[in-house]
Structures are given as C-alpha cells and as structure tokens.
Image (cartoon, rainbow, N blue to C red):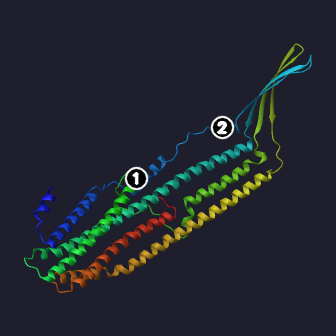
Amino acid sequence: MWIDKFVQQHLNLPAWGKRDLAISLLLLNLLLLSTTAHAQTPANTSLSSLTDAAEARLQTDLVQRPETWVSSWLAAAPTVSIAALKSQADQGTDELELALSLPLTSPSGHQLNQQWQSIAQHYQQQLLKLRRWYASGQVRNLVWTIAQHQQQQQLLQQQLQTYQGLMAPLQQQAETTEVDTYFRYGLQQAQTQLAMLQLEHQQHQQAAEQQLMELTGTRQIPTNLADANPTKLDAAAWQQHPQLALLQLHEQQLYLQQQQNLSGNTPWQVTTRFKRIDTAGISENQIGLQLDIPLSLGVQLSQTEQSNYQISQQQWLQDYQQSRQQIIQQYQQAQAQLSLLEAQYQMLQPHQQLRQQAQSALLLLLQRQEINPDIAQQRLQQLFAEQRQVQLLKQQIQQAYAQLQQAAGVPL
C-alpha cells in the first residue's frame, strides 16, 4: 500500500517529524471518512419520508392477530338444548325435546353497538396518530443528533487546517531554534486535541446513524431538517396531544361498558322448540317458538357493577391527570429550553465579527512569533471553542423548536 511505503520512507525522521507524520495520517483518515459520508447523502430524503419508513417498521413489529367476526344481530353464541323424559308409569308419557336458543341484540343494544363502532374507528385513528407522533420523535432526535456531529466535524476540520497552515512554514525551515521547537510542539498538541475531539464526534455520529438505520432503513438525513408545516403553538397547544385524545376515548369506552350492563340492554331470547310425545302407542310432534323480552324498570345496575364502574372511573381520572401533568411539564420545559438557547445565542452572536478580527490578528502574531506561544495557544483554542459553540447553538435552537412541536403532540 502507498501508506506503508510512505511510512517506511520516513522512518528515519526525528521524533518531531514522526509525530507530524502520525498526526497527518490521522487527519487524512478523518478527512476521508467525512468526505465519504458527505458523498453518500441523497437528495430525495425528507423528514416525512423518514417518518413514513419508521412508522412502517413499527407496524411490522406489531403482533398480527386474525380478524374476528362480529355479528350485528347476535348478542352471544346460540345454544342447543336436548331433553329426554321417560315416564315411570305403565301408561305414562315419554317426551323428547330439542330447542335452539338465539340471544338477539335488543333495539337499544343496536344503538349501543353503533356507538361502539364509532368509538372503535376513532380509537384506531388516534392509535395511528400516536404511532406517527412517536416515530416523529425518534426521527427528530436522531437527525438533529447526526446533523450536530456533522457540523462540529466540519468546523474542527477547518480549525485543523488553520493549525496545519501554521505548521507548514516551521516544517520547511532548514534550521530550527529552541523557540521554534517549543512552538511546533504546542501546535502539535493542539492538533492532536482537535483530531481526538473530531474522532469522538465521528463515533457519536456513527452510533446515531446506526440507530437511524434500524429505525428507517437508511443512514442518511435530509439537507433541510426544519418541519415542513410547523404548527403555530400557544400555551394550550398540548391539549391536542394524541395521548390525551386516546385517554378521552377510553373514558367513553368505560361509559359504554357501564351502559351495556343495564337491564334495558339485555339480549332478547328467541327459542325454537321441537317436542315429540309418546303416550300409550300414540305419538305426537309439537313445534313452537318462544320469545323472552326482559322488562327494564328504570336504570338497573347491581351493586357490584356500580362499584366496578366507579373504581374504573377513578383509575381513569388518575391516569388522565397524571398524563396531562406530564405533557404540560414537558411542553413547558421545551419552551424554557428554547428561550434559554435563544438568550445564549443572543449573547454570543453580536461578538461574531470581533471574534473573527481577533482570530485574524492572533494568527498573524503567531506567524510572526510576536506573542507568547502558551498565551497564543490558549487564546486560539478559546476562539475556536466559541466558534463551535455559536454554530452548535444555532442548531440547538432549531432542534429545540422541533422538540417543542413534539412536546405539543405535533407529528411530522
């Protein structure tokens, strides 16, 4: 390999030359990795398509149960009864009876079933919204994590190139003084620290990309990370949260269960009977129809049913209040985080031009070696760190806005 030949040709370098070579190879490796990742970015990826893929994968993870048949007129399973009666007297009567009983849904039961069907449809829709919202949260978190690590690597690469520009004239000198050696050592240390920091960002980016791959089937993120149609939020935006909507439907289900236990919704019983009677050599067949209609006298519930309903209602109220409080807290925390990041950015952004001027002046002093190397290194590292912090804050503000949408229950 060309790298092996390159190393062998430089084995006789002095110690500082070998350190330069090691740093150069590390920087080359980081540059190749970042270039390859950037070249693979597709143009047609969007947040919506990533969420679609995540939602589809979440659907495949669900247990597929066979659909059950639901009758619109049978309230329960039919029953067949057989009775055989043999007389103990000499001239007695023997009877054989066959009966088929059909529990039919009462008229009020039909109305109740229609309400059940309506709630079931709304419940399914809210489940889909909840799954979409959950997938949106996963996608939002991962794409912004990847984007932040990518941007930090790009800034670190630019800063490494600045150090390389300072190192170049020192490496080309035929004779070096003790000051030059100490100055070069300081630059090498700074390069190594930035290269190690860049490597950490790469590892975090790769871990997030692997999670995105497992979630959506792709490692790539779109170029535009802003929500396509952001919802205008206010202090009560959380009220439309899909988790609360599901709980509200659950309360309606509890009410319908209580109504179903009322005596007025008891099924009507239709029974067809066939009876054969044998008496002293005479046989007779009888066919009949029986209809049993429950008589409801007002709202009738047993004490057990009433107690169970009250317990379920209290448990639902507790769950709803707890979920509501958690959603409010998460929404308020997202608002506070966004305000904090915006305030921090407003404090740092006005000094951007001054920082650039200070960096240019400091680099000029370093090239001329007209400043103490230790002081120069500290100031340059501070300027570079502030530059990375400002760019990180810009992305964190956009991410905080996306998290605010997520806390309000707004999907992608």
Location of mark 2 (residue): 71
Mark 1 or 2, nearer chain start: 2
Q: Nearer the viewer, mark 1 or mark 2?
A: 1
Mark 2: few, some, or many residues within 10 Å (few <14, many ≥20)?
A: few
Residue at which label 1 appears: 214
In the image, 334 versus 381, the foreground residue is 381
Q: Dot 1 lies on which element?
A: helix
Percent position of residue 235, x then y: 54, 70
Q: Residue at horizontal 34%, vertical 65%?
A: 149
Residue 223 visible within the image: no
Q: Is residue 209 above or below residue 279?
A: below
Q: Quadrant of residue 76?
A: top right
Instruction: Report the quarter where the N terminus lies.
Output: bottom left
Does 297 appear above or below 358? above
User: Which amino acid, mark 1?
Assistant: Glu
- Image coordinates of residue 61 in percent, x first then y, are 48, 48
Considering the numbered disc 2 on the image, is that residue within a helix, a strand or a loop?
Answer: loop
